[in-house]
């Protein structure tokens, strides 16, 4: 990871909501599916999304490692039509659901920044990093 990428990652992680912050109920996310969340406004705005697979839930910063724009064009449409990969709609990069690794596109070999989450009861919350 380059120094600039590391700096950007640290800046985003500093904006992750506090541990225990409620995101949504588990059944609000398709399986497989994804759902986006926004916290704060202006320069402090922070965008993230949750991906739910058959086995687990994961969360990522909603910023493509190519041009650092949000991945989705339409609300909560983060996945490919087959729902087997994450798609950046800006230039078509594809990412693994389970680790955010970019397998194809202009940022191939880079990864989305992961955010720790956990399931408490039937709710998804921010977890300890
Ligand atoms: S911004 Fe995501 S592929 Fe270019």
Image: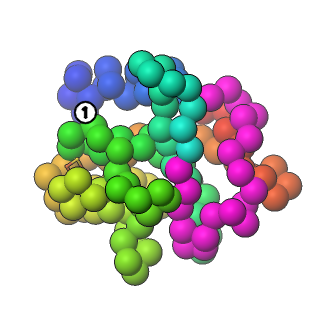
- Residue drawn at (55%, 72%), measured in percent from left and top? 32
- Residue drawn at (48%, 38%), measured in percent from left and top? 47
Residue 109 lies left or right of residue 73; in this view the side is left
Residue 33 lies left or right of residue 8; in this view the side is right
Q: Is residue 116 above or below residue 5?
A: below
Instruction: Please state which of residues 5 and 61 is positioned toward the viewer in this rendering.
Output: 61
Quarter of the figure with residue 42: top left
Quarter of the figure with residue 55: bottom right
* Quarter of the figure with the C terminus: top right
Note whether residue 56 is visible.
no
Instruction: Please state which of residues 73 and 95 is positioned toward the viewer in this rendering.
Output: 73
Note whether residue 44 is visible.
yes
Instruction: Please state which of residues 14 and 55 is positioned toward the viewer in this rendering.
Output: 14
Q: Return the x and y of residue 27 as percentages of the image width and height.
A: 73, 66
Instruction: Please state which of residues 16 and 40 is positioned toward the viewer in this rendering.
Output: 40
Residue tagged by mark 1?
1
> The magenta stretch spans which residues?
17-36
Magenta stretch: includes residue 28: yes
Q: How is the image coloured?
A: rainbow
Q: Return the x and y of residue 14 as percentages of the image width and height.
A: 50, 21
* Quarter of the figure with the N terminus: top left
Q: Is disc 1 placed on a helix, strand or loop?
A: loop
């Amino acid at each position: 990871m380059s120094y600039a990428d590391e700096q950007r990652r640290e800046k985003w992680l500093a904006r992750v909501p506090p541990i225990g912050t409620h995101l949504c109920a588990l059944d609000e996310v398709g399986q497989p599916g994804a759902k986006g969340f926004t916290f704060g406004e202006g320069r402090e705005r922070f965008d993230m999304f949750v991906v739910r697979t058959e086995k687990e839930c994961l969360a990522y910063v909603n910023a493509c490692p190519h041009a650092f724009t949000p991945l989705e064009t339409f609300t909560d449409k983060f996945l490919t039509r087959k729902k087997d990969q994450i798609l950046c709609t800006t230039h078509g990069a594809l990412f693994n659901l389970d680790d955010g690794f970019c397998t194809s596109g202009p940022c191939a070999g880079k990864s989305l920044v992961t955010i720790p989450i956990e399931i408490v009861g039937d709710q998804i919350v921010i977890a300890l990093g």
